[in-house]
Amino acid sequence: MADDSLQVDVESVRKKRRLHWMAAIGGGVVLLIAVVFGVMSMIGGGDDPQPTAAGGDSQPLRAGLAQDGALYVPMPRPFLFNLPGPDRTYLVQIKVQLQVRGTDAQNAARKHIPLIEDTLLTTFSAAEADQIRRKEGKDELRTQALLNVQNALQSITGQHQVERVLFTGFVMQ
């Protein structure tokens, strides 16, 4: 009879152990989901489309701002390129937005995105790996990109249009 009670106790311990593991795994999954949700809400999801007016109008709400207000034109995709360094080749990804003044400049920048992308990619791929590893080098690259974009748009539209080139994401591996 003592053997039967021992057998039952061992089986109940196994069941309890299994339940504890399942609860721990379930809690870990819930915690992981909460962390991912928290990180995503902090990042803010920069790829969301701009909000539109209540009537479903395709004009962004920002268009109602003063003509001289700062507006931002995101590049549709990040720039991804290889950059040779002294000891190895680096993979670089840069997300860019352009700061413009007024809806006319915003529309012109959007219209000429292929030209702007080409100009930026040419500028970025001409950089040196040692240069853009430093903060000062990134600032120089940003300034050079602005000058090149302004010159490219000047030749097409007759105006600079772009006020600043902003790096909203920068990864170098």
Image (cartoon, rainbow, N blue to C red):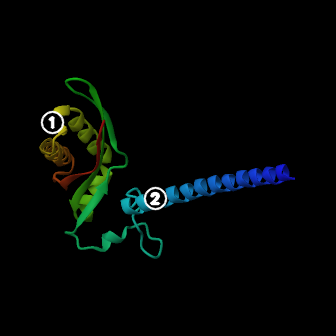
The residue that disc 1 covers is: 131
Q: Nearer the viewer, mark 2 or mark 1?
A: 2
The residue that disc 2 covers is: 35
Instruction: Give how far across and how far down residue 22 sits, in percent.
Output: 64, 54
Helix, strand or loop under label 1: helix
Structural distance between the alpha carbons of marks 2 and 1: 35 Å
Rendered image quadrant of residue 59: bottom left
Q: Which residue is drawn at 69% across and 56% down?
A: 16
Q: Which amino acid does label 2 sit on?
A: Val
Q: Within 10 Å of the Cα at label 1, are there few (<14), some (14-19), or many (20+) other Cα atoms?
A: some
Q: Which residue is drawn at 24% across and 33% down?
A: 125
Q: Is residue 93 left or right of residue 124?
A: right
How many numbered markers are drawn?
Answer: 2
Instruction: Give how far across and how far down residue 69 sits, in percent.
Output: 21, 69
Asked whether disc 2 touches disc 1, contact meaning CB atoms under 8 Å apart, the reply is no
Helix, strand or loop under label 2: helix
**Outermost residue to the bottom:** 54
**Outermost residue to the front:** 2
Q: Residue at x 39, y 64 (%)?
A: 50
Q: Which of marks 2 and 1 is nearer the N terminus?
A: 2
Instruction: Give how far across and how far down residue 24 sits, in percent.
Output: 58, 55
Q: Which amino acid does label 1 sit on?
A: Gln
**Outermost residue to the right:** 1
Q: Which residue is drawn at 25% across and 54% down?
A: 98
Say if residue 132 shows up in the picture: yes
Q: Nearer the viewer, residue 124 or 62?
A: 124
Rendered image quadrant of residue 87: top left
Q: In this view, does 12 lie above or below 155?
A: below
Quadrant holding the C terminus: top left
